[in-house]
Image (spheres, grey):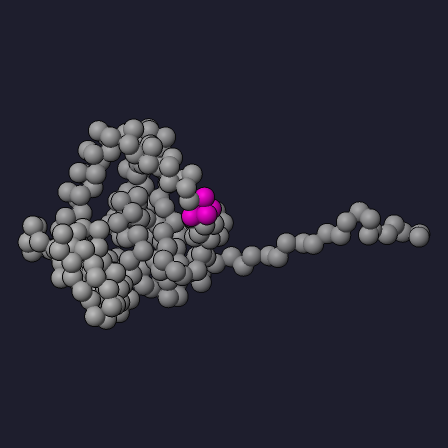
Amino acid sequence: MHYIYFPDKDSWFPCNIKYFYKSRNKHDCLSPTCRECEKAKSNNYNNTHKEQRQINRKDYYDKHGEKEREDMKIWKSKNKDKVFEYAKKFQKENPDKISQYSKNRQNKNHKINTKEWIACKDYFKNENGEWCCAYCGALWKDHYMRYAGEIIKSDLHKEHVDHLGNNDLSNCVPSCQSCNSSKHTYILEYWYNENHPNFTQERLDKINKWIEEDWKLYYIEKKPRAKYGSKKNKVTLGQ
């Protein structure tokens, strides 16, 4: 077995895949730098090029996303046992991550009442007066989703325009399931632009106008909950 000496680490590393990645250009060769250095280099690049990586990821999924989703569906349908075992193992070994994910999802739920939600959907009605997705124009009456293995009719999603923004009406637009999943955590301008298959400048202007000012016309100020003292602290008249 061959060994390579690294002066900066003052140590020898055996030439195998335990300490070196395979070369990207030649599959029968190893990378000239060790795994630790490759990881450090990759982490440094990711931290200094976050926005560019997000743009590159969007461009990649615009070109190959549909094929990858179809391939994944086919693989999952053929390997249901593997998927179930992996999910069960992950939940058992990572209870903290599961708990944190649940807390994060609770924090991402919109805190708007029924009247506000109806007003929001009314604002984004199409020219025929029908509720529709603010991004692609998909009609509410045609909106279905898979739940518990069945296809059921579903309301539009309360979509966060800014993923890290507020959970009130100022950051909420109606969205179909497809757009809700596709946008994910992307910044609006990176995801919804001329490269989007259903993009229109009119829809984008309407979304921006809503989140900048028009939501205020339909916001209902929440009344603070009344605080009631315990029965022990109540004093009856005449005492």
Is 2 in front, or is 8?
2
Q: Is residue 88 left or right of residue 66?
A: right
Q: Is residue 125 visible?
A: no
- State the extent of the magenta-drawn residues as a range: 95-99
Q: Is residue 58 left or right of residue 91?
A: left
Q: Is residue 66 visible?
A: yes
Instruction: Please name the predominant secondary structure of the magenta segment in the image.
Output: helix
Instruction: Tell me which residue sits at (93%, 52%) in the image.
Output: 238
Picture mark count: 0
Instruction: Tell me which residue sits at (8%, 53%) in the image.
Output: 29
* 115 falls in the magenta region: no
Residue 96 horizontal/vertical position (percent):
46, 47
Instruction: Tell me which residue sits at (13%, 62%) in the image.
Output: 32
Is 119 in front, or is 176?
176
Q: Is residue 33 left or right of residue 150?
A: left
- 151 is higher (above) or lower (below) than 41: above
Instruction: Tell me which residue sits at (22%, 51%) in the image.
Output: 18
Residue 188 horizontal/vertical position (percent):
28, 60
Residue 83: name its quadrant.
top left
- 138 is higher (above) or lower (below) than 49: above
Residue 5 horizontal/vertical position (percent):
18, 65
Residue 228 horizontal/vertical position (percent):
73, 52
Is 75 in front, or is 154?
75
Q: Residue furthest front?
A: 1
